[in-house]
Image: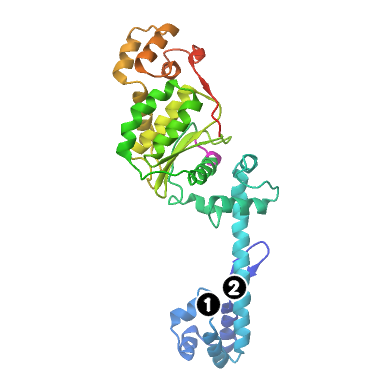
Amino acid sequence: MVRSRSYIATPPGATIKEQLNDKGMSQKEFAARMDMSEKHISKLINGEVQLTPEVAVRLEVVLGVPAKFWNNLEAIYREKLIKAEAENTMDADEKLAKQLPYKEMSKFGWIPETRDSKEKVVNLRKYFEVVELSLLENNQITRIACRRLAVTEKSDLALLAWAQEAKIKAREVKTAPINIKGLIKIIPNIRLMTVMKPKEFCPKIKAMLAECGIALIFLPHLQGSFLQGASFIDGNKIVVGLTARGKDADKFWFSLFHELAHIILGHIGQLNGTSDEDESDADKWSRDTLIPVVDYEKFIEDNNFSAYNIRSFAKKQGVAPGIVVGRLQNEGLIKHSMLNDLKDHYEIAL
């Protein structure tokens, strides 16, 4: 028996059991009279197997109740079972839908606007390409390597929504076969682009990464996702998504190199996503690739972090001064309120 708010699906087996009780017949004797195994009869009574037309004919002979009655009972049970299970699933999905940033997603045009809770569920199922939202917990569906600032249940769902949009957008990007060696080779060239403006470097980086089998996607930030970027394999390409909200250059480049680190270090595609160690390794790779550790340590030895010195060091490194400022701030060598005028602020068109 399966219950929901509106339906009770009772299997025909319940009626069979009543008939056996009325006749004082055991299931073992009944199985023998039906010329069927006791195991199958047990499953039939418990609704675990379908009551077929052939079984209905046997029931008519053994129990004296017309086959048409049993066939009708089975049809009613199956119909109510589907409706009850669908209603229960809808109820569970409505709760999940409330935790997703539906209003914001619809504002971005990712899903249709609606206030109806059931319509929201249907739209979200289509958006995520799953028959029910509970499947989003399946690691086979969501293998994502990402950089974010905090983890909560709602932020996890917001991340999945954001990553799904990156996946959808990436399908429009033509890429060559995945080439990790090729990616490693172009990293120095990407690093040199930190001194460019977004309108200059965005198309160039997208084209270079596409040649390595990587689709670079910029998306708006979803509130509550605490997301900086994410990377994952989708089919025959790698998707790298970055939040495109107005952000300082140092944060943008660190996030991009962090995601590229996940690819180069082999973190993407793991069943359970990335570990804390993976995230730490990606942070280190990003930091030391943008500013080599030996050069950086030599620079901070003098403890002279004037605007002039930072510009000079950045110029020698071939990176934007804001990247140096950001690292000094993050490591506590200067206050977060200092030298922010050396940082470029990006507005990346979507």
Q: The N terminus lies in which quarter of the figure?
A: bottom right
Residue visible at 37% across and 32% down in the picture = 282
Q: How is the image coloured?
A: rainbow
Is 17 displayed left or right of 148 in the figure? right
Q: Earlier in the sequence, mark 1 or mark 2?
A: 1
Task: Locate residue 348: give its quadrant.
Answer: top right
Q: Secondary structure at mark 2?
A: helix
Q: Looking at the picture, how far across and down is residue 8, in whole percent? A: 64, 68
Secondary structure of the magenta portion, mostly?
A: helix
Mark 2 nearby-residue class (10 Å; few <14, some 14–19, many ≥20): some
In the image, the segment drawn in magenta is 151-155
Residue visible at 47% across and 34% down in the picture = 229
Q: Looking at the picture, how far across and down is residue 195, in whole percent? A: 43, 20
Residue visible at 46% across and 85% down in the picture = 28
Q: Looking at the picture, how far across and down is residue 150, in whole percent? A: 50, 33
Residue pointed to by mark 1: 50
Residue pointed to by mark 2: 78
Residue visible at 68% across and 46% down in the picture = 113
> Is the C-beta separation of discs 1 and 2 under 8 Å?
yes
Q: Amino acid at mark 1?
A: Gln
Q: Nearer the viewer, residue 274 or 61?
A: 274
Residue 284 visible? The answer is no
Q: Amino acid at mark 2?
A: Arg
